[in-house]
Image (cartoon, rainbow, N blue to C red):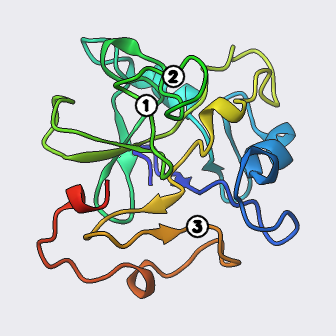
Amino acid sequence: MTVDGNSVLSCYGGATYGPCTDYASSATNAEGDTFTQCAGHGSPYHYHTAPTCLLQQMGPRSDGASPQVGWAADGFPIYGNRGPGGVLIKACGETGADATYCADSCGGYYGTDYADDFKYRYFLMGAENDFTTSPLSNLPGPEYFPFSPLCLLGCGATSIASTSGDRNPRIGDLLPACTGASIASAA
């Protein structure tokens, strides 16, 4: 959930498109032509990528990084599309991805060097929109996949893939009870 009250959905676009396993099967690729200039869509309105209007309204942190824009269901923070120093977060290993600040396969970053109190955080990825066209004039490409959290790493080494047929799983049914296990074991 973002601070503006909108949901953050995974890359899964629904049964029509099948499980989200890569850019080609993502909601961003399949439904991008319905994203508004603020990068959301639907009813209820939700995000799959960086919420450009929200990021514009909140402004960057003093180091150029995006602010925290919300919370994932597993309790970790969700940040916008830029890491420390204003680095545009891309998937690790992709062309142009920063070697230090890049997103893992779940759409997050593990580390204690991010100037927050967390060891893990998720990102909503994609370049900023130009705010002049709707739908988005520049949809994020494969280098930003999975765009939003693809799995939840909340407690211990259990990951929750968001490729199931349920767009809105009941989180209590999926996440293990927290027992103090460290996220480090899942990174």
State the image coordinates of residue 17 (x, y, percent, origin top left): 85, 63
Distance Cα–Cα, label 2 vs label 1: 6 Å
Query: Residue sitting at 33 percent across and 65 percent down?
Result: 74
> Which image quarter holds the N terminus?
bottom left
Whether 29 is drawn above or below 161: the answer is above
Q: Which residue is at the front of the view, 44 or 107? A: 107
The residue labelled by disc 2 is 97
State the image coordinates of residue 2 (x, y, percent, origin top left): 44, 47
Nearer the observer: mark 1 or 3; the answer is 1
Looking at the rendered structure, which numbered label has been put on residue 162? Answer: 3
Distance Cα–Cα, label 3 vs label 2: 24 Å
Is the Cβ of the residue at disc 2 closer than 8 Å to that at disc 1? Answer: yes
Rate crowding at label 2 as few (under 14), some (14 to 19) or many (20 or more) other CA atoms within 10 Å.
some
Taking the image as shown, residue 15 lies to the left or right of residue 162, namely right
State the image coordinates of residue 80 (x, y, percent, origin top left): 44, 32
The residue labelled by disc 1 is 102
Rate crowding at label 1 as few (under 14), some (14 to 19) or many (20 or more) other CA atoms within 10 Å.
many
Is the Cβ of the residue at disc 1 closer than 8 Å to that at disc 3? Answer: no
Q: Which residue is at the front of the view, 75 or 42? A: 75
Q: Which residue is at the front of the view, 24 or 13? A: 24
Looking at the rendered structure, which numbered label has been put on residue 128? Answer: none
